Image (spheres, rainbow, N blue to C red):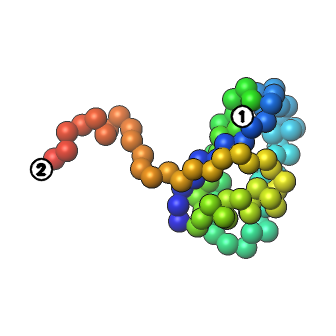
Amino acid sequence: MKKFIIERNLPGAGNLTPEELQSISEASCGAITHLGKPYHWIESYITNDRIYCVHIAESECAVREHAKLGKIPINTVNEVITIIDPLTSKALKK
């Protein structure tokens, strides 16, 4: 399984109501159920005009299939190659 960052351009995303966000969430969860393969939606970040989602899936193709099933816009999909955090700044032990 691979981790993906998905960018969805959605003008006004930051002004979505709780009901609209619930509807988007339900569409995503329903699409996962219909995929019939391992797929995990981890979380999404809402900005003014975009939604950035973190998903775990077998492939980019599966991510795009999820978006199609959920009728959720998708603009870019990028596979996460590695993750860094504050611990990365510590010297490597030899």
Number of marks in picture = 2
Residue 29 visible from this viewpoint: no
Instruction: Return the x and y of residue 79 as percentages of the image width and height.
Output: 54, 53
Query: As drawn, which residue projects farthest toward the bottom?
Result: 36
Q: Residue placed at 71% from the left, 45% from the top?
A: 75
Query: Viewer-proximal residue, 77 or 91?
Result: 77
Where residue 40 sits, quadrant-wise, is: bottom right
Residue 60 in picture, x, y percent from top left = 62, 60
> What is the C-alpha distance between the residues marked 2 and 1?
43 Å
- The answer to whether residue 24 is seen in the rendering is yes
Residue 61 rendering spot, x and y as whole percentages: 66, 64
Q: Residues within 10 Å of mark 1 (few under 14, many from 20)?
A: some
44 sits left or right of 11 in the view: left
User: Which residue appears at 87% of the width and 38% of the height?
Assistant: 19
Q: Residue furthest left?
A: 94
At mark 2, the secondary structure is loop
Task: Report the residue at 58% width, 67% height from top.
Answer: 58
Q: Please, what secondary structure does the residue beneath circle 1 have? A: strand
Mark 2 Cα shell of 10 Å, populated few (<14), some (14-19), many (≥20): few
| Mark 2 lies on residue | 94
- On the image, numbered disc 1 is attached to which residue? 50
What's the residue type where badge 2 is placed?
Lys
Q: Give the residue at the far front of this rendering.
A: 75
- Mark before the other along the chain sequence, 2 or 1: 1
